[in-house]
């Protein structure tokens, strides 16, 4: 059985990981990018891998539910619903390891 769209209006339940897991259970694994690809991408150290994971989330049929739940749970880390979380907040992009470049500090 598949579901095509899980909209926000139909959500009356708590946005728990259990609910996301239950809803994702109705979708074939190959339609869930974080199941069809290496799940390590969603918690990658490399900024380019993180951006790739965010892009893969774009077509996920449970993306809205995933993002809402991650916001509510204040996920500490990882890509959820196409957004990168760090310490419970969405951040625009992952910074590479090491000291900032001199030209970044001046910007
Ligand atoms: S939106 Fe959530 S469930 Fe879908 S691929 Fe991204 S992390 Fe996985």
Image (spheres, grey):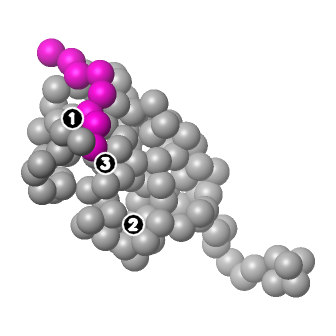
Does the residue tagged 2 have its C-beta within 8 Å of any atom of ligand 1? no
Q: Is residue 61 left or right of residue 98?
A: left
Seen from the viewer's position, the closer of residues 45 and 82 is 82
| Image location of residue 86, percent across then percent down | 44, 71
**Most extreme residue toward the top, as rendered?**
1
Q: Which quarter of the picture shows residue 96?
A: bottom right
Count residues near mark 3 (Cα–Cα under 10 Å), then give few for <14, some for 14-19, many for 20+.
Answer: many
Residue range (magenta): 1-8
Q: Is residue 92 left or right of residue 99?
A: left
| Image location of residue 70, percent across then percent down | 31, 59
Q: Is residue 22 above or below residue 68?
A: above
Residue at image position (40%, 76%) is 87
Residue identified by numbered label 2:
77
Label disc, if present, on residue 66 of the rendered structure? 3
- Magenta segment includes 31: no
Does the residue tagged 3 have its C-beta within 8 Å of any atom of ligand 1? yes
Q: Earlier in the sequence, mark 3 or mark 1?
A: 1
- Residue 49 visible within the image: no
Q: Which quadrant is home to the N terminus?
A: top left
Residue at image position (59%, 63%) is 92
Does the residue tagged 1 have its C-beta within 8 Å of any atom of ligand 1? yes
């Amino acid at each position: 059985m598949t579901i095509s769209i899980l909209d926000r209006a139909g959500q009356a339940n708590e946005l728990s990981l259990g609910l996301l897991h239950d809803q994702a259970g109705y979708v074939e694994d190959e339609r869930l990018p974080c199941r069809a690809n290496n799940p390590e991408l969603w918690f990658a150290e490399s900024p380019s891998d993180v951006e790739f994971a965010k892009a893969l989330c774009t077509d996920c049929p449970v993306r809205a539910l995933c993002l809402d739940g991650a916001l509510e749970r204040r996920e500490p880390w990882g890509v959820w619903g196409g957004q990168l979380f760090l310490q419970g907040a969405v951040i625009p992009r992952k910074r590479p390891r090491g000291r900032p470049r001199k030209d970044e500090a001046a910007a």
